[in-house]
Amino acid sequence: MKDCIIIGGGPAGVSAAINLKLNNKDFIWICGKSPSKKVSSAEHIKNYPGLPDVTGKQLAWALDNHASLMDIQKNEDIATAIYDLGGTYAVTAGENTYESKTIILCLGVTASKPIDGEERLLGKGVSYCATCDGFLYKGKTIAVMLTDKAFEAEAEFLCSLAKKVYLFPIYKDCKITAENAEIIVKVPQKIEGEKRVERIICGNESIDAEGIFILRSSVSPSVLLKGLAAEDGHITVDRQMRTNLKGVFAAGDCTGRPYQYAKSVGEGNVAAHSVIDYLAELKNN
C-alpha cells in the first residue's frame, strides 16, 4: 500500500514527485516512455521564472535531472485503469497493479478524443496495453493504432503473436515491416461490435478485427477513472487541486488553461501538499 501514485511525467508530475520525496512519502511515479515530450518540443520558453530564455530541451533536461539527483524512480508504463476500492485505489500499469491511499493525476491534455465505441468496448476487445493483453490474440486478426513511434516495439510484439495486424500509425514514416502487418494511412473513426469488437470503420471502409490496441501516451480521464468530474474536457478541481473523488487530486494542463509550465509546476506542488495533509487526516482518524 503506497501513500500516493502520481500519473503523468510532465512538469506537474515532476513537481509533485519532488515534493512527496522531500516529505518522505512512499509513492510510485508512473510517467510513460516520453514523460516531457511537450516540454522538449518547445523552441523557446520565455515566461518560466528564473529562466528568461531557455529552450524546451534544456528545461526538460533540468526537470529530469532534478528528479534523478533526488533518486526518484520512474515507472515508464502507461496507466490504463484506476479502480476505486472504497477508501483506497488500485492502478493498473503495464502488467502490474498497484494500490495507494491517494492519486495525483498529471495527465496533460490530448488533442484526440476517444474513438466512437472505444469506451463501450473497453475490455471487450479494446485494449491499451500490448504486453498485458497481447497473448489473448495469438493467431487472431487485430488492429493497432499508434500515436507515436515510441510504441513501435509494442506493435512489433503484437505482430509476433497475431495472424494479421492492421496498423494505423498517426504519424509519418512508420518503420514496422512485419510480413503480417498492413499499414493503413487512415484514422479509425468507429469501433463496432455487439458484445465484443468486430470491426473498425475508417471512412467508407470496414475492416474486420477481433480486437484493437490503442497505444497512446495517456488515457483520457473519463476512461481512466469512472466517476471523475470534468468540464469542457478538463478535470474539475478546487484551489487545493482536489477532485470530486476523495483522495484523488489533479494538476497541470489536465485541470484547464492556461497551459503554462509554471502553472503546472505550481499545481503539482499544491497537489503534493494536499496529499500530505490528506494522509495526516487519515492517520489522525
Image (cartoon, rainbow, N blue to C red):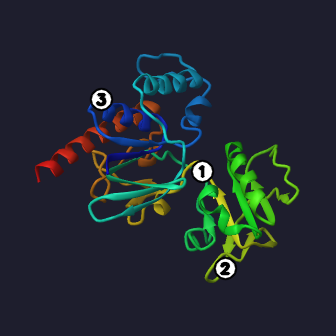
Mark number, residue 22 = 3
**Residue 256 horizontal/vertical position (percent):** 43, 47
Q: CA distance from mark 1 to mark 2?
A: 26 Å
Mark number, residue 193 = 2
Kind of residue sitting beneath label 2: Gly
Question: What residue occupies the far left of the structure in this picture?
Answer: 284
| Residue ID at (29%, 49%) | 238
**Residue 161 horizontal/vertical position (percent):** 75, 61
Are the residues flagged by discs 1 and 3 in contact, CB closer than 8 Å?
Answer: no
Camera-side residue: 98 or 260? 98
Are the residues flagged by discs 3 and 2 in contact, CB closer than 8 Å?
Answer: no
Ranked by sequence position, the earlier of labels 1 and 3 is 3
Kind of residue sitting beneath label 3: Leu
The vertical placement of 44 against 127, above or below, is: above
Q: CA distance from mark 3 to mark 2?
A: 49 Å
**Residue 148 horizontal/vertical position (percent):** 68, 45
